[in-house]
Image (cartoon, helix red, strand yellow):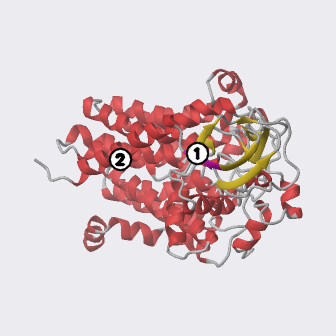
């Protein structure tokens, strides 16, 4: 046993990777599986095209919505796509690049949970918490049923942030400010909703852990690193039509569904007849019960975790409807059961309750074995469909032809610009994010470029800037060209507002990395 403990102490990531094998083996089966959000594969292809066109950071992609384009990465979490694009650059297919990001999220989230819990509990209990974090049923639902690309990857960052918060009051080394900053930024850039859900509770933990100026700087640094994304997403959301696609009121799980050991591959539907599982997890529920039994012996970390669980369960219950109607932006969560992400995190932390118990070590080993044995069978898709890139590009990208599959889908997740009076029904003739052409007009007239107007589109007529505005009926780019023969150029570029934020984010990221790698004085 001593040799095992020594190996775990020296190589924790290797051990966690090995123990993660039952959760990730299905990702090595060739091709993509049946998942609700398989459109992320097509979105990655759009990111690739946008980057190759020289747009960085990528915001407006060229081919969505019948080729009228869309400011996709102005609003959609970019970091998982950036990571996937690295693998595509290394010649991975789009499908394999997305699957690799799913794969990375599992052991990395477990590793950072282990490092965080190791600050508050023994080695074996910390490893037990990491295994619960990996093997809670909702983690499988996220990957193998929902295909929730950003949310699954975002699980890496809450324990990383909590770990940095714990270390800052203990150590004078300023590197933890940089780590905290990168952790907060990673959470925001990985999934907007997860960040909105987790950050208030992480701030509460920071206050409990001995909040000081260095912790504050860490959070500020994280906000500055990611400001190029979150501030335009908030400010420019007013330019888009309000539409959450799904109404949260239809997707409250019942309390019985939270504690019923059911795992299904269906969908979330109104009422209690969902095909999807909302089970908290057998070991997770056992830890909650034990925490209440030994409530008098709970430390601050355990109480914080129980508080998160209580609030999450309340927010998943229909009795919290008034809160959903009151809190700004929270209806964009769409599914109250998303708070299972928070209960997954919080129940994993409850292992610290048993750190001072004589049997804590053996309980930790039992939890590790139990978490894997009870839950590993959930970690596989319902169908190994073996689909490759071509299937998803045909299904979601209407270029060069509009497929029947695309016509049936109609990209329901895309909130159209407010200036769009009706959705296009035919492919745009204008395919690229920039174009130069010569035009000869007998009279002055407005010229249409069939991409959705969004701040960043610019036009030049004979080298002089022309005023660009939204035309009718699609809200397409439109500008006036005088009579005569003219050279016209049009392109999508960063606005001054976004450009300034890009610089702030870049300098902040450089500052964070510099703080981390510099020698300790």
Relative to 308, does residue 61 appear above or below in the rendering? below
Image location of residue 422, percent across then percent down: 86, 39
Residue depicted at 26% across the width and 67% down the height: 10
Dot 1: few (<14), some (14–19), or many (≥20) neighbours within 10 Å?
Answer: few
Left or right of residue 516: residue 492: right
- State the separation of the CA atoms marked 2 and 1: 36 Å
Asked if residue 120 shows in the view, the reply is: no
Q: Main secondary structure of the magenta part?
A: strand
Question: Which mark, residue 463?
Answer: 1
**Residue mark closest to the camera, 2 vs 1:** 1
> Which residue position is annotated with label 2?
509
Residue depicted at 67% across the width and 49% down the height: 488
Q: Which residue is nearer to you in this view: 280 or 269?
A: 269
Relative to 28, does residue 192 appear above or below in the rendering? above
User: Which span of residues is magenta-colored?
Assistant: 489-493
Image location of residue 28, percent across then percent down: 59, 76
Dot 2: few (<14), some (14–19), or many (≥20) neighbours within 10 Å?
Answer: many
């Amino acid at each position: 046993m001593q040799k095992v403990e020594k190996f775990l102490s020296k190589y924790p990531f290797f051990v966690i990777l090995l123990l993660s094998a039952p959760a990730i083996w299905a990702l090595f089966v060739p091709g993509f599986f049946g998942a609700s959000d398989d459109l992320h594969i097509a979105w990655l292809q759009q990111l690739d095209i946008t980057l190759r066109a020289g747009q960085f950071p990528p915001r407006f992609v060229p081919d969505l919505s019948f080729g009228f384009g869309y400011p996709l990465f102005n609003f959609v979490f970019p970091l998982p796509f950036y990571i996937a694009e690295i693998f595509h650059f290394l010649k991975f297919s789009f499908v394999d690049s997305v699957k690799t990001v799913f794969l990375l999220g599992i052991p990395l989230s477990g590793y950072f949970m282990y490092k965080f819990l190791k600050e508050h509990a023994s080695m074996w209990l910390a490893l037990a918490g990491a295994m619960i974090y990996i093997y809670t049923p909702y983690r499988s639902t996220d990957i193998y049923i929902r295909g929730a690309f950003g949310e699954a990857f975002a699980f890496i960052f809450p324990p990383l942030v909590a770990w940095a918060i714990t270390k800052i009051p203990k150590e004078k080394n300023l590197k933890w400010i940089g780590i905290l900053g990168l952790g907060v930024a990673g959470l925001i850039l990985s999934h907007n909703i997860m960040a909105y859900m987790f950050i208030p509770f992480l701030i509460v933990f920071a206050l409990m852990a001995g909040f000081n100026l260095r912790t504050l700087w860490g959070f500020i640094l994280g906000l500055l690193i990611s400001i190029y994304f979150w501030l335009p997403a908030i400010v420019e959301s007013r330019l888009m039509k309000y539409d959450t696609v799904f109404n949260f009121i239809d997707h409250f799980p019942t309390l019985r569904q939270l504690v019923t050991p059911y795992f299904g591959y269906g969908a979330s539907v109104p009422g209690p007849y969902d095909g999807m599982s909302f089970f908290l997890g057998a070991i997770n529920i056992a830890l909650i019960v034990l925490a209440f039994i030994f409530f008098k012996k709970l430390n601050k970390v355990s109480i914080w975790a129980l508080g998160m669980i209580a609030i999450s369960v309340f927010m998943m219950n229909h009795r919290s409807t008034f809160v959903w109607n009151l809190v700004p932006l929270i209806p964009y969560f769409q599914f109250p059961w998303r708070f299972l992400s928070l209960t997954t995190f919080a129940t994993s932390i409850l292992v610290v309750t048993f750190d001072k118990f004589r049997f804590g070590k053996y309980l930790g080993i039992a939890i590790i074995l139990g978490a894997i044995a009870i839950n590993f069978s959930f970690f596989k898709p319902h169908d190994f469909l073996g689909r490759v890139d071509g299937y998803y590009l045909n299904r979601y990208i209407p270029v060069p032809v509009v497929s029947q599959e695309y016509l049936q889908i109609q990209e329901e997740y895309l909130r159209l610009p407010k200036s769009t009076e009706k959705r296009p029904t035919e492919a745009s003739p204008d395919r690229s994010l920039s174009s130069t052409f010569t035009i000869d007009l007998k009279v002055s007239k407005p010229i249409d470029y069939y991409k959705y107007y969004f701040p960043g589109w610019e036009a030049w007529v004979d080298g002089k800037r022309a005023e660009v505005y939204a035309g009718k009926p699609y809200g397409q780019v439109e500008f006036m060209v005088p009579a005569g023969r003219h050279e016209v150029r049009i392109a999508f570029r960063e606005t001054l507002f976004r450009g300034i934020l890009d610089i702030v984010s870049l300098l902040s990221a450089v500052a964070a990395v510099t703080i981390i790698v510099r020698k300790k004085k």
